[in-house]
Image (spheres, helix red, strand yellow):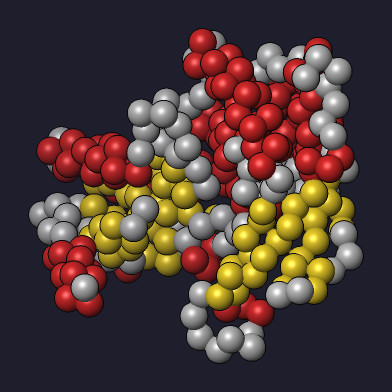
Amino acid sequence: MKSGIVPSELKIAKVVPLYKNGENASFSNYRPISILPCFSKILEKLVYRRLHQHLIKNNILYNYQFGFRKCHSAHMALIELVDRIYTALGKKEFAIGVFLDLSKAFDTVNHNILLQKLHKYGFRDNVYIWLYNYLTNREQYVSIKNYDSKKNSVEYGVPQGSILGPLLFIIYINDFASVSTTTFPVLFADDTNLFISNRDLKALIKNLNHDLQNYSEWFRANKLSLNVKKSNFMLFAGNKKCERDQIKIYINNEEINSVSSTCFLGVQIDDKLCWKEQVEKVCKKITKS
């Protein structure tokens, strides 16, 4: 660790395809599982503790990032979002939740940008050299039954199946929250929700579209891909009447779909907050058991 060198043997990942469902001859029905040497994970665990200690001591991480953090969880993210919706409705405000879908966010992290951010957050000298060495010259190969492919270099993304990967990712997107002062992000790793409220619906829509333009520029600058077709938004109006068809929300100059119900962190949220669809979803799972 003092030398800042990560042995090359510890940077080789074995990728094994795991069958999900559907036609077993289709590549898209398999999930790639990355397996790293166990010695690599031991070394990463030691580094993780030091990096995490620095982040906590200096209060660097965004408070409402609930993914891959101690004393944070998915249900806390859901409680935070729902509580803000109830608070807005209690003030007789309109509220909109935008649920963004990132395409393979962990696999598209740019190493140069990540290293710049690590340096900015105070990871320097030997620590920076070690992290640079950890991210560069990585390789992977695919193993199916008794056959192994040739090794290929991995130039993007945080190492899959690693201890440090999730922590490096939340550092990478940490400044996402500073893009706007009017829109409130609730994050769980790459699951991104934006919340905004206002008594004036027209002002609300105007502010949100302006902020989404800035968020779009942030995604572009950080080389992350947004799947607009899988992204959606939901209006929470309580008993207030409004013309929902007239609400147009855009990102990347593309209109985002308006929905009355969506799945966030495994829970079905509806615009009336009656939880009927979530209860039915749970009942179906229980019935199968």
Q: Quadrant of residue 125?
A: top right
114 horizontally vs 70: left or right: right
The quarter of the rendered structure image containing the C terminus is bottom left
Q: Is residue 271 visible?
A: yes
In this figure, what is the number of numbered marks? 0
- In the rendered image, residue 198, in percent from the top left (x then y), is placed at 28, 39
Q: Quadrant of residue 40?
A: top right
Q: Quadrant of residue 274?
A: bottom left
Q: Is residue 246 visible?
A: no
Depth check, front residue: 50 or 76: 50
- In the rendered image, residue 201, in percent from the top left (x then y), is placed at 29, 48
Q: Is residue 47 above or below residue 164?
A: above
Which residue sits at x=76%, y=28%?
131
Depth check, front residue: 162 or 113: 162
- In the rendered image, residue 126, in percent from the top left (x then y), is placed at 80, 15
Which residue sits at x=44%, y=43%?
188
- In the rendered image, residue 170, in percent from the top left (x then y), is placed at 56, 35
Q: Is residue 97 above or below residue 42?
A: below
The quarter of the rendered structure image containing the N terminus is top right
Which residue sits at x=35%, y=50%?
97
Which residue sits at x=41%, y=36%?
66
